[in-house]
């Protein structure tokens, strides 16, 4: 029988592999990202004042970009250019990954939210490239995401996150988490464990 300390060490060393598994097998193709087209589409659809830059107010239409503004904004001017978005999307191709396991935790007022549906919806400039992913929260508030093609995990990219829990045909979660969601997430090699604290 293995020594308890060795067993614990093995579990901790294997945990990142288990949680961040990358899928490259049959049927899991690397998405055909087009960084330039995605960036141009993002700016064209959200640039309301035609200055070729996306301010924080304009980025409210893209929770995926807004929630990652600080890391995408290379010149730290609190807005995004097409070049900055293009550079970010280009990273997804460089990863060489078709899909990654994504584990979510959803809490409501500090307690696990049970039986809620969580959807990772590709931002509009990525809808032709990556797939929608969904999951349902368990008793501990956790959910594993699967694409609409039944592939476990999600492709690298920018998503808006929609969390919904219906009771007797009525939505019990505020609109800012679903129909007018403010939640966004970027799936990358170092970002596959998402936690959302709702209230």
Image (cartoon, rainbow, N blue to C red):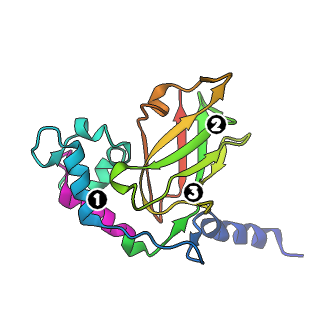
Q: Residue at x 71, y 42 (%)?
A: 138
Name of the residue lying farthest toward the right: 1
Foreground residue among 3 and 31:
31
Q: Is residue 166 visible?
A: yes
Dot 3 or dot 2, earlier in sequence: 2
Foreground residue among 65 and 16:
65
Q: Is residue 73 visible?
A: no
Q: Quadrant of residue 129?
A: bottom left
Task: Residue 34 in the image: state x and y as whole percent.
Answer: 30, 67
Q: Secondary structure at mark 1?
A: helix
Label 3 CA crowd tier, 10 Å (few <14, some 14–19, many 20+) = some
Quick check: 6 left or right of 23?
A: right
The quarter of the image holding the N terminus is bottom right
Q: Residue at x 60, y 78 (%)?
A: 26
Residue occupied by mark 3: 147
Main SS of residues in magenta:
helix
Q: Secondary structure at mark 2?
A: loop
Q: Residue at x 39, y 59 (%)?
A: 128
Task: Residue 153 in the image: state x and y as whole percent.
Answer: 58, 60
Q: Residue 141, relative to residue 3: is it above or below?
A: above
- Front tag of 1 and 2: 1
Q: For marks 1 and 3, give the CA distance.
A: 21 Å
**Disc on res. 38:** 1
Q: Is residue 77 magenta?
A: yes
**Disc on res. 187:** none
The residues colored magenta run 76-92
Residue occupied by mark 2: 116
Name of the residue lying farthest toward the left: 51
């Amino acid at each position: 029988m293995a020594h308890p300390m060795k067993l614990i060490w093995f579990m901790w060393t294997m945990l990142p592999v288990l949680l961040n598994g990358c899928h490259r097998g049959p049927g899991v193709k690397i998405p055909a990202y087009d960084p330039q087209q995605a960036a141009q589409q993002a700016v064209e659809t959200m640039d309301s004042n035609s200055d070729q830059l996306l301010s924080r107010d304009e980025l409210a239409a893209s929770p995926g970009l807004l929630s990652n503004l600080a890391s995408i904004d290379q010149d730290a001017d609190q807005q995004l250019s097409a070049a900055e978005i293009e550079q970010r999307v280009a990273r997804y191709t460089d990863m060489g990954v078709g899909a990654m396991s994504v584990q979510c935790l959803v809490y409501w007022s500090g307690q696990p939210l049970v039986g809620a549906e969580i959807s990772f919806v590709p931002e509009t400039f990525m809808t032709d490239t990556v797939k929608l992913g969904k999951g349902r929260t368990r008793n501990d508030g956790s959910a594993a995401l699967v694409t609409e093609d039944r592939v476990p995990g999600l492709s690298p990219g920018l998503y808006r996150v929609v969390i919904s829990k219906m009771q007797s045909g009525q939505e019990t979660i505020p609109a800012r988490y679903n129909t007018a969601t403010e939640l966004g997430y970027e799936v990358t090699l170092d970002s596959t464990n998402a936690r959302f604290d709702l209230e």
